Every structure is written in structure tokens, then in C-alpha cells.
Amino acid sequence: MTSPDRRSVLRAAAAVATGATATACTRGGADLAAARAAAPTTPRPASPRPAHAARPPTRAPGLPAQIAHGPRRGDAVALTFHGQGDPKTATALLHEAERAGARLTVLAVGTWLDEQPAMARRILDGGHELGNHTLHHRTICALPEDEAYAEITGCADRLRSLTGTIGSWFRPSRTQYATDRVVRLARRAGYPHVLSYDLDSLDADDPGAPAVQRTVLDGVRPGSVVSLHLGHPGTVAALPPILDGLHRRGLRAVTTTELVT
């Protein structure tokens, strides 16, 4: 039997041991919490901006093989851009459009895509649509058939390799309207329609932003398809007042596909 004095000593020792253990656990927990608080936090990676898919060639049943404008009774117009030139100027123009909630159609020249492949994704990620404006921007209606076809398919190949499709539209180079032969060649290459336009902004002549603005706003109508160019600073400067003018008339700038389908 253990004497009362010995039991008291044992109880006291156990109490001391238990207290020391509890203190150690508390201190250890506090140290761990402090260490966690002091440790650098690795920021969670930002979610990537969702990429917009490239559209396949647009089919608009009931519309002609060559389209120059959309419905005249609607509230939309299509601003279409020759895709070539300084990428900084092009990016500035896309930014102005996006800031105003406008969506554009860019018809890219194949050699420009060779030089500036990142522009294809930049255009699509802005919610715009991308199409084919021939490989070298030659006078396509004057070319022999095999060379004209190579101009169409050469750009189509670039678009397919960069985006997965041959683009929404084909627009002939150095002409407002394609000949019947070029329309047929475009169809053979996979484009149901050739995209023309009914309003030329004349911005390629660099007349200055106010002149571009006047030309567009004086001539635009519901359903208009307007021809403009990416690589001209005057066009970048003209775009905000053009979009403001359209808004005041109750018109929206949409992709050509949205306009006609």
C-alpha cells in the first residue's frame, strides 16, 4: 500500500508534468500559428481570360452569294476592317471599339498574319470576328484562276493554323465587288458568301479623322457594311466619334455575322 504522504507527492508530480505538457502544447500551437502568419502567402493565379472561339464561315440562307449590306429595318451596322499595318495601331483601335462595347469584323491579309500571328488571337479575344482578305492583297479579279484561288486558300491556311477555322468571311482584295469567277473560287475554298460593302470610309487615303468621321456618319444607314482599315492612326482617332454618332442614332456596331443572321 502506498502511504498518504507518498500519494500526495505522486499527485503533485503528476500535476506538474501535466501542466508542463499543456504549456508546451499551447506554446507549440501558438508558435505554429505565428509561423503560419509569418509565412509568405503565394497568390492564387488569376483565372485566364476566356478565349473566344473562331467562327467557321458564315452561312446566311436566303442572302446572295455576294453580300454588301444587312437588313435595312434593323438597328445594327457592321464596321469591317482591312487587317494589315502596325500592330500597335491595330491594338489601339480594337481597344477603342471594346471600350465602347462595339464588335468589329477584321478581314486579315495572310502575309500580315505571318508577320503578326498574335493579332489573330487578340482580335478574337476582343469578341470580334476574323476573316480572309487574300494572301498578298493583290488585284484578285485580274489574276489567272489558279493564282486567284491560291490567294484565297493561302490566307485560309494561315487562319486555320492560327485559329482552327478558315475565318467567317472572304473579302476580295483591291475591289469592292468580286467577279463571278472569284465568287465561285471562294465557294470552292469553303466560303458560302463573299463580303462586299456599301459604304467606303476612304480612310486608306489618310484624309484625317474628321473627314473619316464625316464620310461614315453622312453615309451610314441601318444594315450598312462599312469598309475601314486597321493600320491608320486617323481611323483610330475617328472611331470614338463614329461610335458616338451611331449611338445617338440608335445604331449598334456588331459583327457582320450578327448583322446578317
Image: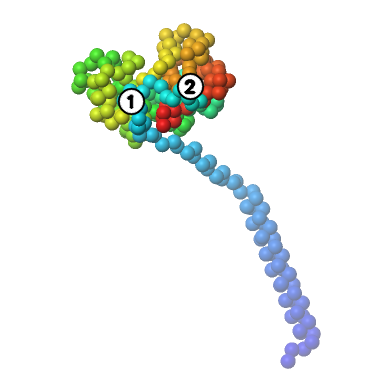
Marks 2 and 1, Cα distance to the nearest angstrom? 18 Å
Query: Of 12 and 96, which appears nearest the observer?
Result: 96
Which quadrant: the N terminus?
bottom right
> In the shown orientation, is residue 68 left or right of residue 253?
left
Looking at the rendered structure, the kind of residue marked 2 is Pro
Res 146 quadrant in image? top left
Q: Is residue 21 above or below residue 223?
A: below
Give the numbered dot on residue 131.
Answer: none
Please provide percent x and percent y for residue 43.
56, 43
Q: Name the residue type under label 1.
A: Pro
**Crowd around label 1: few <14 · some 14–19 · many ≥20 (10 Å):** few
- Whether residue 133 is visible: no
Q: Residue at the bottom extreme?
A: 1
Question: Is residue 49 something one can see in this rendering?
Answer: yes
The x and y percentages for residue 160 are 32, 33
Mark 2, secondary structure of its residue:
loop
* Residue 243 locus on image (x, y percent): 53, 20
Residue at 74% in and 89% down: 2
Relative to 209, does residue 223 appear above or below in the rendering? below
Disc on res. 64: 1
What SS does tag 1 mark?
loop
Label 2 or label 1, whichever comes before in sequence order: 1
Identify the residue at image location x=51%, y=14%.
217
Q: Residue at x 31, y 22 (%)?
A: 134
Q: At x 70% / y 67%, what residue is drawn? A: 22
Label 2 crowd bin: few (<14), some (14–19), many (20+), radius 10 Å: many
Colour setting: rainbow
Q: Position of residue 11 (x, y in %)?
A: 75, 79
* 89 in relation to 49, above or below: above
Q: Label 2, on which residue?
A: 222
**Badges 2 and 1: C-beta atoms under 8 Å apart?**
no
